[in-house]
Amino acid sequence: MAQSDYPSRPIRLVVPFAGGGSTDVITRLLSDKLADALGKPLVIENRPGAGSTVGVDIVAKSVPDGYTIAVTANSAVAPGPLMRTSMPYDPIKDLAHIALIGTFTNGFVVRADSPYKTMREFLDAARAKPGKLTYASAGIGTSGWLSGELLKRRANLDMVHVPYKGAGPAAIDLVGGRLDGMFESLVNATPNVRSGKVRLIAVGSAKRARSYPDVPTIAELVPGVVGAPWFGFAAPAKTPTPILQRLERDITGVLRSSDVRNRLEDLGMEPSGAGAAELLAHIHAENALWGPIIKSMNVIVD
C-alpha cells in the first residue's frame, strides 16, 4: 500500500495504563480530535502493567506501518528505565518518538491544619529539624519520589521519605495527621484541596499552574527543582518517515489548538505540542537530570 494513502484504515492506539484514569481520559479526548485530522478512527487498547512498559513493548515490537502507535510516559521511556535492571525494548532505538503531549504538574501538599502555611516555612522547619519531617509519595520510582529526592539534594535537606502503594493511601494518612507533607499530582490532589482537607503550598512545574496562579513553584525557592510526569506519542522505530511526519503534523496540530489546550489544562496538564526533535531532546534531558539521583539512591523497581 502506498504511503501516500496513509491512513487507509483505523489506527490502533495502545494506552499502557488502565482505563478510567487521567491518562486514559486525556487519550480519549485527543483520539477523537486526531481521528478528525487523520480521517480515520483510532481504536484505543488499554494494556497496563510493569510501570507502563507492557503496552509500550507491544508497540515497539509491532509491524512498523503506522497502524499501531502508543501513548508513552516517563515511566516507560525516561527516566523510568534507569531504575530497571532490564528492559524488553530500547526506549531510543526501538521507538520513533512523535510528539510530546505535555506534563502533569506535581504539587506539594500539607494537611489543612498544618503549622506550615507556605513552602518556605516547610523548608525552614526541615532545616531546623533534620530527620524529623516526613513526606510521602505514591512509591519508590514515581515522579513524586523523584521530586522529593531532587529537592532534598538541591536544598541540602534531611527529610524522611514514606513510600506508599499509590497516592490514595498516602493522602488518607496525610489528612489523618500521620505525615507532614506529600508530593502528589494536581489531578489527584485537587479534590482534597478544594474540599479544604489539604493545603497546596507549592507546585513542581517550571512555571506556576494555571489553576493555582497564587501558588509558587518549588523552583522559585530552590532553583532547579522541577519534575513532572510527561506523556507523548511513539511508533515502532522503523515506521516510514512520511508516515511519521504525517502523524507528527496532525498530532501537534491537535495539541496546539486552543480548545484542546484549554481542556488539558482544566484536567491539570501542561500541554506541549512539541514535535519529534523536541520530544527526543526532552527525553535526553530527563535522563541527564534524574540519572545521577537514581544512581546515587541505587534504586531498582523491577
Image (cartoon, rainbow, N blue to C red):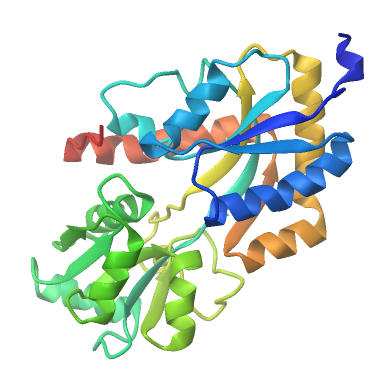
Give the position of the C terminus as an image quadrant: top left
For residue 97, say whether it is visible: no
For residue 86, say whether it is visible: yes
**Residue 19, above or below 301:** below
Q: Which corner quadrant of the image does residue 138 belong to?
A: bottom left
Q: How many marks?
A: 0
- Place of residue 120 in the rendered image (x, y in percent of width and height, measured from the top left): 31, 77
- Place of residue 109 in the rendered image (x, y in percent of width and height, measured from the top left): 35, 74
- Residue at x-position 34% and y-position 82%: 118
278 or 248: nearer the viewer: 248
- Place of residue 92 in the rendered image (x, y in percent of width and height, measured from the top left): 51, 21
Q: Which corner quadrant of the image does residue 97 belong to?
A: top right
- Residue at x-position 51% and y-position 29%: 56
- Place of residue 167 in the rendered image (x, y in percent of width and height, measured from the top left): 34, 62
**Residue 255, above or below 69:** below
199 or 24: nearer the viewer: 24
Q: Residue furthest top?
A: 1
220 or 8: nearer the viewer: 8
66 or 185: nearer the viewer: 66
Give the position of the N terminus as an image quadrant: top right
